[in-house]
Amino acid sequence: MLDRVTIEQLGAAAGAGPILIALSGGGDSVALLHLMAGHFGAARLHAAIVDHALRAGSAADAARAAEIAGSAGVTASILTLSWAEGANRAQSAARQGRYAALCAHARKLGASIIATGHTRDDQAETVLLRATRGSGWRGLAGMRALAPAPIWPEGRGLLLARPLLGACRAELRAWLKQRSAAWIEDPANSNPAYARVRARTVLGDLANVGLAPTRFAALAEYLAPRLRRLDSDALQLIGRAVRFEDETIVVDPATWRGDTEVRGRALGALIAAAGAASRMPDLGDAELTETFTLAGALVRPGKHAIRISRDPGALAGRADGARPLPPLALAPREEAVWDNRLALTVTEPGWSVIAENGKPVLARGAERRPVETASATWLLQPRVEHLLSRINDTKPV
């Protein structure tokens, strides 16, 4: 049931390091735990159980999931999310918190891979949800079996693997029953307040009239290779036509040529990186002949170079009510990422990074220093590669 190609890629990317299993205690993740233990050995794995702390009984379920991991010989850790008073606790916020906790724990363990129990059923639900939200074909390509971790900067340099993306829930549960393996049924899986639960109901209704949910997953499987090629071509274009000069991306108009869709995809990644955006704008193409702002970035065309940088108004605030970027406190010898674009490490206490005149500077009281006096690395190129599914020397997947 584990996808052979994904497992081979996962093993190559992980090297001899540990592999982190995202374990909810549900049937899919428990099946993943047992299958991965059978393939890699239990000692190589570490289970991370995220307690979202959003409902009564979640701590008990997390403890039960840890017991399940222990019975399989896998060491487990429970990661409990904390919520500030009045914090947004919607599904999107819970997802962000979950992946942030998983990524932080992976770094603590020295793991470069996080494996999740997403199945072909999850893929079908994802495609249906994206279709109802008006997604283009790239969104309908669904989830990838191996991809960069889906948050930034927490996911920098980490891969998310979905080795069960070709398996169905029913066969996984049948396999667990044959092994007399226990799992937990999450009450949220039957709560119609959640969009994914409603999508599951719709897929069930469609199955009753002869349209198998697997057709939605098959659509993603059909489109995925095209998206991989598009991202690969976009990276090649960027490699030919783009220079990364600290916080500015410089595009050579003479070599910025090729397929319209490829240019749009590449430009979307460049704008998202320069503008500190969480997602790429969906561009078919854009005429780079006039200055414009988009997704937090400022694009300034010129005869010999097109420059893409941070929109100063996004840092300093605007008269329309956009708030200025708040200061970022820096703890000594702990790397922090400012504005999703700059990694910094200081050696002395009391420093923060702030934006002044559209630029980051180190501040301690009235004292100011250039960020270059700290250990500072601009992350625009790594961000572009993360968005287009490449991490270091890992080929696009």
Image (cartoon, rainbow, N blue to C red):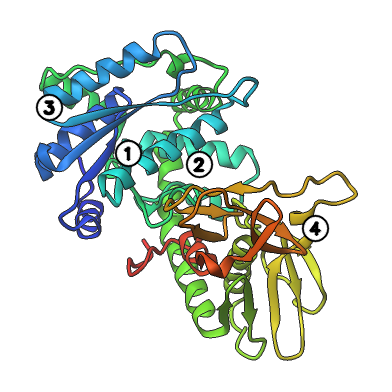
Q: CA distance from mark 4 to mark 3?
A: 53 Å
Q: Amino acid at mark 4?
A: Gly
Residue of label 1: 116
Mark toward the start of the polypeptide (1 vs 4): 1
Q: Nearer the viewer, mark 2 or mark 3?
A: 3
Assign a secondary structure to mark 1: loop
Residue 183, by quadrant, is top left
Q: Amino acid at mark 1?
A: Thr
Residue of label 4: 313
User: Where residue 332 appears, x then y in whole percent?
Assistant: 46, 51
User: Is residue 263 depicted above or below 158 in this figure?
Assistant: below
**Disc number placed over residue 72 in the picture, else none:** 3
Residue at point 56%, 26% (across, down) = 195
| Front one among 231 and 67 | 67
Assign a secondary structure to mark 3: loop
Do the residues bearing badges 1 and 2 touch, measured as CB atoms within 8 Å? no
Do the residues bearing badges 4 and 2 touch, measured as CB atoms within 8 Å? no
Q: Can residue 43 be seen by looking at this rendering?
A: yes
Badge 2: residue crowd in 10 Å (few <14, some 14–19, many ≥20): many
Mark toward the start of the polypeptide (4 vs 2): 2
Badge 4: residue crowd in 10 Å (few <14, some 14–19, many ≥20): some
Mark toward the start of the polypeptide (4 vs 3): 3
User: Where residue 242 appears, x then y in whole percent?
Assistant: 57, 80
**Disc number placed over residue 127 in the picture, else none:** 2
